[in-house]
Each structure stands twice: as structure tokens, then as C-alpha cells.
């Protein structure tokens, strides 16, 4: 059974080797690896891309452009896998994609729908892995976390370039 005293492991960003990444997000691979076991029926790639898009929204604002080749490099996955997984997240309603630009130089801009994530929080995460008396508290923590993520992404402070 999950030890509620170690909840910080589920809330902090960590590198793939399990080391805490610090207060500034270094890369999209610097995600919540400790949280993988609480996702419901999501494969590793979907979790990886979902978490990366949340990270991108923090880095570039919540209507962001990221060069496809850079995403593939960041996530260390194939183009086919990225496109298939992004389509799945779009179909689920967790991200949206809009194209803009000139005919031969259009760009895909992505937006994370934090309201949809909050609405579907119980379909995304399995809070039953926590002790019975902690399950509701953890759920509320996740909801508040996504509200903060939404606020930070919308009120992006421009420390990072908007388009990358």
C-alpha cells in the first residue's frame, strides 16, 4: 500500500534516474516518473507525451509551438509514435491543435485543456492506490495542482521564448 508520507514523490519533478530535478523544469523528460503507476490504462508513451505537453505549456505559454523534430528529440520517440499519441490526446480532448502561418510555412500550435483534465481527473488517475483516508485528499491536491498549472501557463512570464 502507498505510504502517504511519501506523497512528495508523486508531486515533484524527477529525472528518469529518479533524482529530483529542482524547482526549474530542465526538459520535457524531467517529468513525474514516480506517478506512472497511478495513471489508469495509459501506456508509457501516452503518459510521456501528456506530461511533456504540460511541461511545454509551462515553458512556452499555453498556446505553444514546438518544432516536431525537437519534440521527437526531447521525448526520444519516433515521428509515427508522436503523431499517433498526439492524435490520441486530441481525441480525448486533453490538448487541441490549431494550424496557422503561411501556406508553405504553417505551424501547429498546441493548447493543453486543463479544465478537461480537471473534469476527467478520476478517469486519468487511479487514486485508489493511496490509503483509503488519503485518497480524497490526494485527488484534491491533483485538482489544485492542475489549477496552478493552468494559471501559470496562461500567465506565462516570458522567461522562456514563446516559440521554440
Image (cartoon, rainbow, N blue to C red):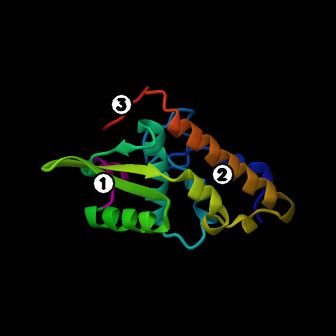
Name the residue that disc number 1 marks.
72
Q: Nearer the viewer, mark 1 or mark 3?
A: 3
Label placed on residue 10: 2
Q: Nearer the viewer, mark 3 or mark 2?
A: 3
**Quarter of image, res 102:** top left
Separation (CA) of disc 2 from disc 1:
25 Å
Separation (CA) of disc 3 from disc 2:
28 Å
| Front position in the image: 154 or 57 | 154
Mark toward the start of the polypeptide (2 vs 1): 2
Vertical side of 67 occupied by 81: above or below: below
The span picked out in magenta is: 70-77
Q: Secondary structure at mark 1?
A: helix
Separation (CA) of disc 1 from disc 3:
19 Å
Q: Residue 122: where, in percent of width, then height?
A: 67, 66
Mark toward the start of the polypeptide (1 vs 3): 1
Name the residue that disc number 3 marks.
161
Identify which residue is drawn at 68% across, 51% down.
Answer: 143
Identify which residue is drawn at 32% across, 37% down.
Answer: 163
**Quarter of image, res 13:** top right
Dominant secondary-structure state across the stretch colored magenta: helix
Q: Residue 66: where, in percent of width, then height?
A: 32, 45
Q: Is residue 33 magenta?
A: no
Number of residues whose C-alpha sits closer than 10 Å to that of mark 2, classed few (under 14), some (14–19) or many (20 or more): some
For residue 57, side relative to residue 114 (left or right): left
Mark toward the start of the polypeptide (3 vs 2): 2
Identify which residue is drawn at 84% across, 65% down.
Answer: 132
Identify which residue is drawn at 49% across, 32% down.
Answer: 156
Number of residues whose C-alpha sits closer than 10 Å to that of mark 3, classed few (under 14), some (14–19) or many (20 or more): few
Q: Residue 33: where, in percent of width, then height?
A: 55, 54
Q: Is residue 73 magenta?
A: yes
Q: Residue 108: where, in percent of width, then height?
A: 29, 51
Amino acid at each position: 500500500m502507498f505510504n502517504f508520507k511519501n506523497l512528495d514523490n508523486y508531486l515533484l519533478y524527477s529525472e528518469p534516474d529518479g533524482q529530483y530535478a529542482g524547482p526549474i523544469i530542465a526538459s520535457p523528460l524531467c517529468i513525474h516518473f514516480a506517478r506512472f503507476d497511478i495513471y489508469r490504462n495509459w501506456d508509457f508513451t501516452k503518459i510521456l507525451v501528456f506530461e511533456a505537453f504540460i511541461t511545454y505549456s509551462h515553458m512556452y505559454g499555453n498556446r505553444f509551438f514546438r518544432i516536431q523534430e525537437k519534440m521527437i528529440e526531447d521525448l526520444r520517440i519516433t515521428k509515427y509514435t508522436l503523431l499517433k499519441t498526439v492524435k490520441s490526446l486530441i481525441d480525448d480532448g486533453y490538448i487541441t491543435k490549431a494550424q496557422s502561418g503561411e501556406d508553405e510555412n504553417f505551424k501547429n500550435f498546441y493548447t493543453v485543456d486543463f479544465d478537461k483534465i480537471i473534469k476527467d481527473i478520476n478517469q486519468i488517475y487511479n487514486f485508489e492506490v493511496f490509503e483509503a483516508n488519503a485518497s480524497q485528499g490526494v485527488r484534491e491536491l491533483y485538482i489544485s495542482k492542475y489549477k496552478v498549472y493552468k494559471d501559470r501557463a496562461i500567465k506565462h512570464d516570458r522567461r522562456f521564448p514563446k516559440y521554440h
